[in-house]
């Protein structure tokens, strides 16, 4: 018999972190593997979530970050339904995704603020610390929020930039959101590159099959996006299959709103067509309204569906889940309120306040991409791309 001693270093701080964001049942698991056999998304070549449950019990951060299975789980809850120990693997994997999100980014304290209710006032103060100085700069002083002609539709303050003439509110939005978007893109690009390299090492992919960025994008991103748009993995779920449709609507809403924002940027910021557009007659506004309605439908359905699922014990809603859904809801509501306040005379004087509330919500939603559950938009896509790539490699190796 070998005298070799296997040394395992448990990371108790990681375990505590997992438990504090919805994974408090992790220690109940006794490794029976029922979950991996009932999971409709678990592949034969790398089954989950049993293995991830034991990695979580020991707090193996590095192994969890390197494992795409953590993101391939869609929290459908089939495993939770059949787990004989009520260890709730589906909910534990959701908390593991939060742990991984934190590990991948700098300024980790931001992730902590997004994960706990006590962090919410701090996040609002952070947003205001950026928004207010930029507002004062763009509007050349403190505008009167009770007077829409002072804020946000001030007709007197315009900026000549190259051949463009931009009103103060457009300059304010650009000064705020262009650097924020650049910050988010840099952080996420760095995290995705880290993830991808760790996945390659974790699966010991031979050097000959380690394709360059362009090849991976060309061969696997398209099929992954088609799968995500169709929600084909989501639709295999059993226990919480109701989530597929509202989640899909929410995704379509974000795509439509992204296209709308890009169009507004080109028309208003580059071509100078910046008068406040009529919500009833302007086609870009129609598109934005369709996106907004889809967003409200998706997010309200997810909130009410989750509440029902929590009562039925098929799903848990941890604070980070609830926070993201309510933040998206507030983005939708404040967006529509701006339009309503503009066209309903009795609300007109409140446009300034609603505008600020909307900007705070959108600012926090942008920043939520690297620092909250919202990161699954990018990281799950990366994991699906890797999954398709890895299956293709296995096929090539076998042929
Ligand atoms: S989570 Fe539950 S079903 Fe899965 S291995 Fe542990 S005890 Fe078994
Ligand atoms: S929640 Fe669903 S997808 Fe995730 S591990 Fe459990 S059964 Fe699989």
Image (cartoon, helix red, strand yellow):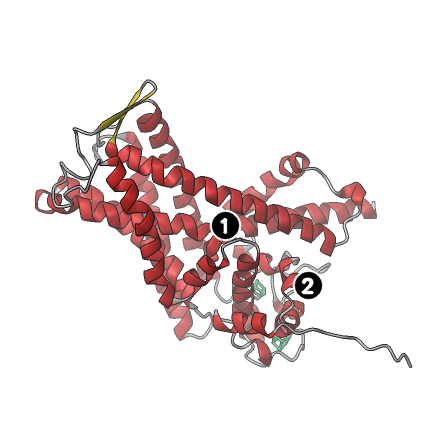
Foreground residue among 166 and 212: 166
Which residue in the structure is indicated by mark 2?
Answer: 47
In the picture shown, does residue 57 fall above or below 253?
Answer: below
Tell me the SS state at disc 2.
Answer: loop
N-terminal label among 2 and 1: 2
Q: In the displayed structure, would residue 254 be above or below residue 285?
A: below
Reply above or below: 117 against 244.
Answer: below
Q: Is residue 305 shown left or right of residue 394?
A: left
**Label tally:** 2
The outermost residue toward the top is 163
Which residue is at the far left? 346
SS assignment at label 1: helix
Query: Looking at the picture, how far across and down is residue 16, in whole percent?
Result: 54, 74
Q: Does residue 96 appear in this view?
A: yes
At which x and y percent is residue 394?
77, 49
Task: State which quarter of the image contains the N terminus.
Answer: bottom right
Q: Which mark is residue 113?
A: none
Callout 2: few (<14), some (14-19), or many (20+) C-alpha neighbours within 10 Å? some
Q: Residues within 10 Å of mark 1 (few under 14, many from 20)?
A: few
Q: Position of residue 382 (x, y in %)?
A: 59, 48
Report whether 183 appears left or right of 330: right
Query: Which quadrant of the view contains residue 49?
Result: bottom right
Q: Which residue has dot 1 on it?
A: 377
Q: Percent from the top left, x then y, of residue 368?
A: 43, 53
Give the number of the mark in front: 2 or 1.
1
Name which residue lies at 64% across and 41% down: 220
Q: Nearer the viewer, residue 17 or 332?
A: 17
Asked whether residue 301 appears in the rendered view, the answer is: no
> How far apart are the two marked residues, 2 and 1, measured between alpha carbons?
22 Å
């Amino acid at each position: 018999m070998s005298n070799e001693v296997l040394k395992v270093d448990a990371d108790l701080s990681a375990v505590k972190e997992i438990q504090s964001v919805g994974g408090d049942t992790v220690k109940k698991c006794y490794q029976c593997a029922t979950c991996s056999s009932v999971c409709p998304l678990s592949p034969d070549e790398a089954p989950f979530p049993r293995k991830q449950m034991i990695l979580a019990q020991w707090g193996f951060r590095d192994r969890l970050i390197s494992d795409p299975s953590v993101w391939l789980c869609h929290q459908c809850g089939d495993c939770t339904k059949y787990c004989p120990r009520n260890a709730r693997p589906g909910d534990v994997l959701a908390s593991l995704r939060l742990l991984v999100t934190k590990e991948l980014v700098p300024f980790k304290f931001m992730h902590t603020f997004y994960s706990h209710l006590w962090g919410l006032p701090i996040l609002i103060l952070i947003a205001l610390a950026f928004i207010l100085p930029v507002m004062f700069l763009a509007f050349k002083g403190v505008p009167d929020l009770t007077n829409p002609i002072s804020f946000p539709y001030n007709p007197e303050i315009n900026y000549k930039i190259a051949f463009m003439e931009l009103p103060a509110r457009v300059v304010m939005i650009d000064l705020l959101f262009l650097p924020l978007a650049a910050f988010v893109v840099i952080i996420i690009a760095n995290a995705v590159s880290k993830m991808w390299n760790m996945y390659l090492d974790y699966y010991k992919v031979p050097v000959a099959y380690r394709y360059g960025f362009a090849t991976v994008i060309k061969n696997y991103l398209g099929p992954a996006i088609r799968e995500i748009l169709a929600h084909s993995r989501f639709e295999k779920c059993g226990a919480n299959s109701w989530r597929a449709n509202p989640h899909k609507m929410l995704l379509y809403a974000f795509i439509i709103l992204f296209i709308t924002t890009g169009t507004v940027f080109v028309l208003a910021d580059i071509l100078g067509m910046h008068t406040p557009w009529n919500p009833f007659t302007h086609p870009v506004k129609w598109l934005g309204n369709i996106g907004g309605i889809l967003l409200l439908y998706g997010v309200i359905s997810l909130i009410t569906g989750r509440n029902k699922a929590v009562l039925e014990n098929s799903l848990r809603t941890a604070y980070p889940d609830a926070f993201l859904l309510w933040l998206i809801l507030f983005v939708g509501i404040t967006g529509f309120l701006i339009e309503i306040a503009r066209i309903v005379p009795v609300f007109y004087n409140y446009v300034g306040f609603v505008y600020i509330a909307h900007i705070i919500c959108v600012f926090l939603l942008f920043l939520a991409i690297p620092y909250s559950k919202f990161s699954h938009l990018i990281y799950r896509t990366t994991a699906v791309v890797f999954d398709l790539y890895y299956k293709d490699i296995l096929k090539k190796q076998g042929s």
